[in-house]
Amino acid sequence: MEGNKTVKSSLNKKTVVKEQVDEQQYQLRFTVPNMNVWNVNDYYAGIIMELKSFSLQNTMMMDCIKSWEQIDQILLDDEDLGKQLSHHSPLRQELENAKVTDITSQKERAEAVCKLVMDHVKWNEKYALWPRSTSETLKEGSGSNADINMLLIQSLRDAGLDASPIVLRSRDKGLLPHNFPSLRKLTTYIIAVNTDSSNVYIDASMGGKVNLLPASLIVERARMVQSGKKSHWVNLRNVQKSSR
């Protein structure tokens, strides 16, 4: 390559464009037709290291996180996330007054609960993993998706529905590693409700609409965390996405 000449070549339907930056350095840009890449780091080859065990002076060796099952338990034991799952909703009286438990269809009941909750709070356009107390969220009238999702879970459970958090890593942050358990890789969570025939999925960022998620949260690898039941992986790719 000489001067500022640009060379294009085709290889396995990929276009490689080399642009000269200076005499010593070149910038490479790869494009793949009809492919939506959320995070290019997912396609880099490399080695990522995380601490497996450690020991301080004159102490025994201590192991770090080994499995996703350990992370499940950490989340369930957490005061902000797991412990709040068993609390009653601060909207419990409103739910009773609305007689939502009289709705036979579990999906329709879930929709009614979500509407009631979202009439009291609004999303502040922020995503998070760790929610604050639901009483504080209700008092302020707004919160992150994690804040409002916890209020939704408590309300759904008070309405007699089986609701659980599904933790995940948003698509713009990269793939959640299946064989590389890491709490710091999680960025937020949505809600799964076990209804009459199947699970339905909810997130406060979409106004609590059933089976409607923002595109950034429709991932193929998310984890449903359940107390008293075995947690498991969930593929959200078939859930209807919004334009966000």
Image (spheres, grey):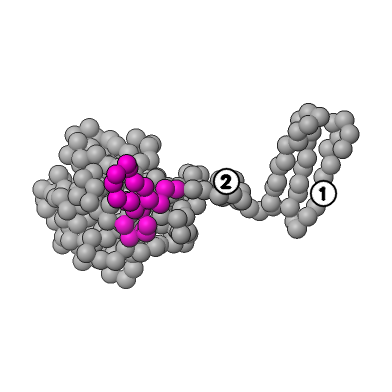
Q: Which residue is at a point 85% across and 31% down the rendered structure image?
A: 4
Q: Residue furthest top?
A: 22
Principal secondary structure, stretch drawn in magenta = loop
Residue 56 falls inside the magenta stretch: yes
| Residue nearest the viewer, comparing 101 with 193 | 193
Q: Position of residue 83 (x, y in %)?
A: 19, 50
The quarter in which the N terminus is drawn is top right
**Which disc number belongs to residue 41?**
2
Q: Is residue 3 above or below residue 29?
A: above
Magenta span of residues: 50-70
Does residue 73 appear in the picture of this structure?
Answer: yes
Q: Position of residue 231 (x, y in %)?
A: 32, 63
Q: Is residue 80 left or right of residue 145?
A: left
Separation (CA) of disc 2 from disc 1:
23 Å
Q: Which residue is at a point 75% across and 56% down the rendered structure image?
A: 13
Q: Position of residue 91 (x, y in %)?
A: 15, 46
Q: Residue furthest right?
A: 2
Q: Is residue 176 left or right of residue 128?
A: right
Q: Is residue 52 left or right of residue 101?
A: right
Does residue 209 appear in the picture of this structure?
Answer: no
Q: In what element is the residue under mark 2? A: helix
Q: Is residue 96 above or below residue 173?
A: below
**Which disc number belongs to residue 9?**
1
* Quarter occupied by residue 111: bottom left
Q: Residue furthest front?
A: 58
- Amino acid under disc 1: Ser
